[in-house]
């Protein structure tokens, strides 16, 4: 198994997913609720009730829990599987950074995660997934 390029941080963040067939057009489809987990500079694991094919381009809006910033980034689905215990799909998404601002926001959020162990760990609700 190949080691990961970037260190992962276990952090739940509310996320909205919009699948993109054309990066400039989301076809008016409402975003899908999700959570990110195992967040890194290079990507994240997503949990959601809807599955996407490997290779699908997604637009993500991630509410970073530590810095309260809304991060907007595009990513490609690299793997997916069904999680019986949580009753959701899990997907690995590799970020496609087009702006240094997103990288800096992630670095700030992840750095704060290492320095603030006193903050409570947020857990996602088992309900509330769906379209908004």
Image: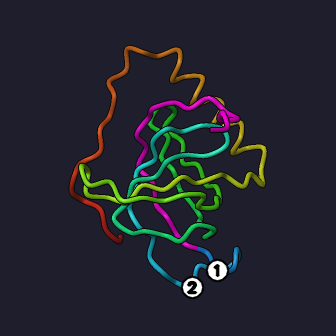
User: Front-most of 5 and 34?
Assistant: 5
How far across and down, in percent of the image, does residue 48 sit? 37, 60
| Helix, strand or loop at mark 2 | loop
Contact between labelled residues 1 and 2, with CB atoms less than 8 Å apart: yes
Image quadrant in which you'd find residue 40: top right
Magenta residue span: 1-19
Q: Which residue sits at x=58%, y=61%?
A: 77
Left or right: residue 100 compared with residue 71? right
Q: Which residue sits at x=64%, y=58%?
A: 75
Placement of 31 over or under 102, stated as above or below = below
Q: Which residue sits at x=59%, y=79%?
A: 26
Image quadrant in which you'd find residue 41: top right
| Helix, strand or loop at mark 1 | loop
**How much space separates mark 2 and mark 1, taking CA atoms?**
8 Å
How far across and down, in percent of the image, does residue 107 sit? 66, 31
Left or right: residue 117 compared with residue 120? right
Q: Which residue is mark 1?
A: 21
Placement of 45 over or under 27, stated as above or below = above
Give the residue furthest to the bottom.
27
Q: Quadrant of the C terminus?
A: bottom left
The prevailing secondary structure element of the residues shown in magenta is loop
Q: Quadrant of the N terminus?
A: top right
Q: Which residue is mark 2?
A: 27
Image quadrant in which you'd find residue 93: bottom right
Q: Is residue 4 magenta?
A: yes
**Which one is closest to the eye, mark 2 or mark 1?**
1
Q: Is residue 54 magenta?
A: no
User: Front-most of 90 and 121?
Assistant: 90
Circle number at residue 3:
none
How far across and down, in percent of the image, does residue 44 sit? 55, 46
């Amino acid at each position: 198994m190949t080691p990961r390029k970037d260190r992962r941080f276990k952090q739940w963040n509310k996320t909205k997913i919009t699948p993109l067939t054309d990066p400039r057009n989301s076809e008016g489809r409402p975003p899908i609720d999700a959570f990110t987990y195992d967040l890194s500079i290079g990507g994240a694991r997503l949990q959601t009730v809807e599955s996407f094919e490997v290779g699908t381009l997604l637009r993500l809006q991630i509410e970073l829990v530590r810095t309260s910033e809304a991060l907007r980034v595009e990513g490609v689905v690299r793997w997916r599987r069904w999680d019986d215990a949580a009753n959701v799909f899990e997907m690995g998404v590799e970020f496609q950074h087009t702006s240094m601002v997103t990288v800096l926001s992630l670095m700030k959020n992840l750095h704060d995660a290492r320095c603030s162990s006193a903050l409570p760990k947020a857990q996602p609700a088992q309900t509330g997934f769906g379209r908004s």
